[in-house]
Amino acid sequence: MEVLSECFTNINRRKKIDNSEPSETFQRCLSVVDLTYIGLGSMIGTGLFVVGGEVAKSIAGPAVVISFLFGACAALLSAFCYAEFSSQVARTGSAYIYTYVSIGEIWAFAIGWNMVLEYISMISSVARAISATVDSVMDFKIKNATIEYILNGNRWESPIFEEYPDLLAGTFVVIVVLLVSLGTKLSSAVTMICINVLFIILFMIAVISFVYGDIANLTSEGGYFPYGIGGVLEGAAVCFVTYSGFEVICISSEECTTPKKSIPIALGAALGIVSLTYIIVSGSLTYLVPYGDIVPEAAFSTAFMEHGLAWMAYIVTVAIILAGFSTLITALYFLARLIYALSIDGLFFKTFSAVNATTQVPVKATITFGAICTLLSIFLKYDVLVTFLSIGTLCAYTIMSGAVIVLRYRPKSESISHYGHIDASSDGMTLYTHTNNSVHLDTDEEESIDGVRVPDKTGTLRTQFAGLSVFSGYKPGVVVPFALLGFVFFSVIGMLILNNVSDLLSSVGLTLVVIILFILSLGSFAIIPLHKHSVDTGHIQVGLVAVRYLFLSLRGIGYRVTFCVCQTGLCRLCISE
């Protein structure tokens, strides 16, 4: 039993961060503007040109604008969680490091490698999308030449491998690897140029769409809500994935000048700009042509051709290439630093934690994983690559939302917001001293505020609920994580039954089971606010976290939608029957 207990303790141990000594491993050269452009480059992928068309065509109709607005609200609540962590943990690692310091090592390990898989798939699939876009403009001459001269006219037949080696896709990844390896400032500058040109093109697309469009297109073929409110909400679940990528901003904590201030500002600015862009672009599409005439795979190109503007199709192609290239840069930038964070914590080979003295970039991680992405983009099929993309995003956002709740009800002596200078006392107890002079913690029981020592009751029952003996007697902060786990577990089981039983009302037993599950779910959730949460005026704290967590759980399971988050503009979203 002692061995099992020690094993359990080790896999759940939390990383301690000394915020009083800022890391100097990377060059601090990124401003708020740089961070905002990095976020824009990651979020505005080439999916901008397909997701809006797909949702308008098959799910929400002209009300796709409202779907994007709801998706933006959900993404904003996710960003709040990242903003709160970033104001307390100024370290490279994003969701991985936030999970490590708040929940434990085993969870951080799972999230970290989920995100590695996600970004490897993203880089490879986006490279394939750019290659296909360029090749289509050239009437597929590159593809045909590769099959004729390299494969002697034969094609590979495999469920996993592409029918020919896509050397152009691999070339794009190699270019990005070299660019990212030369330094953060250079890659940030290139991203900025790509995004600026892209926004000029998007502005042109919006203006021309409103000039040649007709307001009658918004109400034809069933009105503005042809699929009803349900279609708008279902569309919001799909649109939400287009906002993924803002976590790239948080990976830059050790490379920006004022991380605790700059990252939350950049998160808000990037999400605001992206939300407005998606709303305007999707709105201009449904204004240009009736939603029923949209061709999702090439929404804007075909729409402009209907109005005799074939030259605009080439402009749209340039925009797709720019969007894809900026996504490649930011994705590889994120992946290399995530590998660095895993390595420096001992969860991967230490050699990948080496940072080049000249460029101050984890070059080994960048080149090694860039090579892996190159090989995958050359040989694997596109649909195989996009299969893994949604896993990491859903896991990271869900655990981040839950982690904020757990931290909010954790005693202040264990809170990461109070990890300042760390010393070891004579009896082996670790002392955490906040750098703010108004708060000093030296035990697990008390805090000092303006010289008056008062008990720390964070994580304990509120005074008015002290009579609930079933929840008393536990260590402060222990009940809330179990209540949260119960809420998620009962909600997931209930949703799975609802989604897989076609005629629920015909079975009285199943109906009662679902009702009981949702009562247990709401009961578990209601336990959380019975406890006292912490209030830390020294860092950002945001509300609605629990509501965000509820929304995310229902979004991921409740809607009958299967989607990919390739952000490439070439795959068709799979809408289940």
Image (spheres, rainbow, N blue to C red):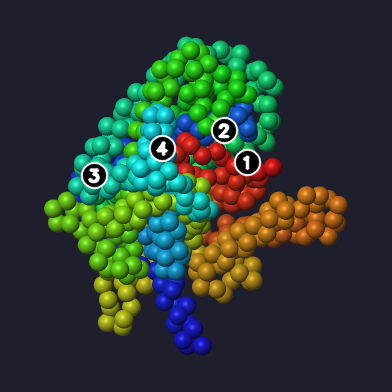
Marks 1,2: beta carbons within 8 A? yes
Whether residue 133 can be seen here: no
| Residue named by callout 1 | 575
First reached walking from the N terminus: tag 4 or tag 3: 4
Q: Nearer the viewer, residue 13 or 510?
A: 510
Q: Nearer the viewer, residue 423 or 496?
A: 496
Image vertical order of residue 421 relative to residue 11, above or below: above
Q: Amino acid at mark 1?
A: Ile
In the rendered image, residue 258, in percent from the top left (x then y), is placed at 25, 47
First reached walking from the N terminus: tag 3 or tag 2: 2
| Residue named by callout 3 | 179
In the rendered image, residue 188, in percent from the top left (x then y), is placed at 26, 40
First reached walking from the N terminus: tag 4 or tag 1: 4
Where is residue 415, by image quadrant?
A: bottom left
User: Secondary structure beneath disc 1?
Assistant: loop
Q: Amino acid at mark 3?
A: Leu
User: Secondary structure beneath disc 3?
Assistant: helix
What numbered label is drawn on residue 492? none
Marks 4,1: beta carbons within 8 A? no
Marks 2,4: beta carbons within 8 A? no
Q: Amino acid at mark 4?
A: Asn
| Residue named by callout 2 | 54
The crowd level at tag 2 (other Cα within 10 Å; few <14, some 14-19, many 20+) is many
